[in-house]
Image: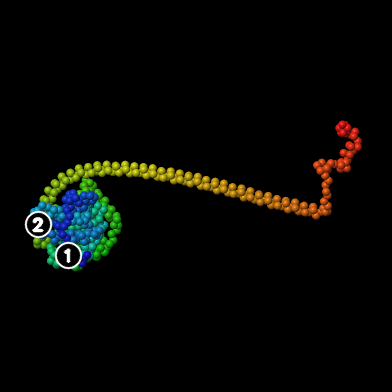
Amino acid sequence: MASDSPARSLDEIDLSALRDPAGIFELVELVGNGTYGQVYKGRHVKTGQLAAIKVMDVTGDEEEEIKAEINMLKKYSHHRNIATYYGAFIKKNPPGVDDQLWLVMEFCGAGSVTDLIKNTKGNSLKEEWIAYICREILRGLTHLHQHKVIHRDIKGQNVLLTENAEVKLVDFGVSAQLDRTVGRRNTFIGTPYWMAPEVIASLCDMHPMRALFLIPRNPWPVRGSKKFQSFIESCLVKSHSQRPSTEQLLKHPFIRDLPNERQVRIQLKDHIDRTKKRRGERDETEYEYSGSEEEDEERDIGEPSSIINIPGESTLRRDFLRLQLANKERSELIRRQQLEQQQNEEHKRQLLAERQKRIEEQKEQRRRLEEQQRRERELRKQQEREQRRRYEEMEQLRREEERRHAEREQEYKRKQIEEQRQAERLQRQLQQERAYLVSLQQQQEPARPPQDKKQLYHYKDQAPSSNDKPTWAKEVALNPCFAPGLQLHGGQ
C-alpha cells in the first residue's frame, strides 16, 4: 500500500459520482465537530445499525483535503485500532449551495479519552488503564507509520472508545503521506496546543503521544510507578530523532508488562456503563474531534502549560475559535430541526415497536402451531413405525409357523417312507425264509410216485356197478330191513 502513488489515488476519487445517502443512512443527532465538518450519530435505515457520519461542505479549496481523508480511510482503516470506514456519499443541494459529503465510519458509543478523564473521579486514570489505552494507540500508530502515514493530530478527542472498551483512532483530516511533496508534509497543521516541537519547527510530527497526558495541563505529577514515569519521559523527549518510535515504545516495560488486559477492559466497560447511568441512561456520546479544545482552554485559563507559546499561536487559535463558533451556530438550527425529527421518529418507533410486537406474537403463534404439527407428525410416524413393527413380527411368526409345519410334514413323510421300506425288508426276509423252509422240506421228504385218485361217482358217464358201490351201500342191499322204505319203494 505504501508504494501506491497518492496523486493517482486522489485522482481516482470522483466525488460527483458518489451515491446520495437518502434512504441508506439518516442523521440522528450532532455529537461533535471535526477538522473540516460536523460529526453526527447516524443510523442505517434498513438495519438500524449506528454509525458516525462526518458531514462536510464540498468546496474547491477543501476538495484535495477531503479526497486525502477518504483515501486514508479507504486504505488504512482495516486495523482494529482505527475506526472502520464504511463509505462516502454526496448529498446534492440546490444550485448556489455547496454539496455535502457524508463520510460514514464506525460509531464509538463510549466517547473519547477526554470524556473518560472528565468522568473519572479526580480526573485521573489508573495506571493499568493508561497502559492499555496507550498500547492500543501505539498499535494503531505503528500500523499507520508502517504505511508511511502520519496522523498529525493525536489528542484525547481523537482517541475514541467503544462500549466494549476498544480503542479507536479517528479524524484523518490533517494526516499526511510521507512520500508526498515536502512542502505539503511540512505545513503548519494540527491542533495548536497538542503540536509536537518538530511540527512547530516545520518538521514532521512522528509521535505526539504526550498530548494524552498533558490534557489537564497540570504540573508534573510526583505520584506514579517508575515504569510509568519512565514511559512519560520517553514520550516527552524533545528531539524527534532521539525520541523512541512507536515500535520501541510498545516494548517499554510499562506497556509490555500490562498485567491483565481482560480485567482492564472489564473495568473500563463497567466505568463506561456507570457513567451512562449517572447521566440518566442517555445514549449520547459527546465526543469531539479536532479544534474542540478551546472550551477547555477557557475553563483552564491561568493553569501552567508545558508547551511554550510561540509567535502566531494566538492567531491560529482565533481562527479555530471562529470556525468553531460558525459550526456551533449552524448546528444549533440543526439541533432544533433534529428535535422535531426525533419526536416524529419517536412516534414512528412506537408504531414500529407495536407492529414489531404483533409480528413477534404472530411468529410465536406460528411457531407454536408448527411445533404442535411437528409433534403430531412425530406421533403419527411413531405409530406407523409401531404398526410396521407389529406387522413384521406377525409376519415373522407366520413364516416361522409355516416353516415348522413344513418341517413336521417332511418328517412325517420321511417316517412313512422309512416304515414302508422297513416293511418291505421284513416281507422280503419272510419270503426268503419260506422259500428256504420249502426247499428244506423238499429235501427231507423221499420222492413219491404220483397216485391217481378214483372217482367216487360217475353218474354222467356210466351207471355205477355194484362193485363200485361203497361197503355200506352193499350192506343195505343185502339186508333190506335196514331200509324198509327203500324196499317198499322197490316192491311197488
Indicate the amino acid at tag 1: Arg
Numbered circle sitting on residue 73: none
Location of residue 126 by image quarter: bottom left
Residue 297 seen: no
Which residue bears the numbered disc 2?
A: 318
Q: Amino acid at mark 2?
A: Arg
What secondary structure is found at the residue carrying circle 1? Answer: helix
Q: Is residue 230 above or below residue 341?
A: below
**Residue appearing at x 23%, y 60% in the figure:** 140
Which residue is at the front of the view, 322 or 274?
322
Residue 480: x, y in percent? 90, 34
| Spot occupied by residue 3 in the image (x, y as percentages of width and height) | 21, 67
- Upstream in sequence: badge 2 or badge 1: 1
For the C terminus, give its image quadrant.
top right
Image disc number at residue 8: 1
11 or 149, which is in the foreground? 11
Residue 371 coordinates in the image, percent (x, y) = 35, 44
Q: Quadrant of the N terminus?
A: bottom left
Q: Residue at x 25, y 58 (%)?
A: 80
* Cα distance between the residues tagged 2 and 1: 36 Å
- In the image shown, does 212 or 224 lie closer to the viewer? 212
Residue at x-position 80% and y-position 42%: 460
Question: Residue 368, percent across and down?
Answer: 34, 42
Image quadrant in which you'd find residue 209:
bottom left
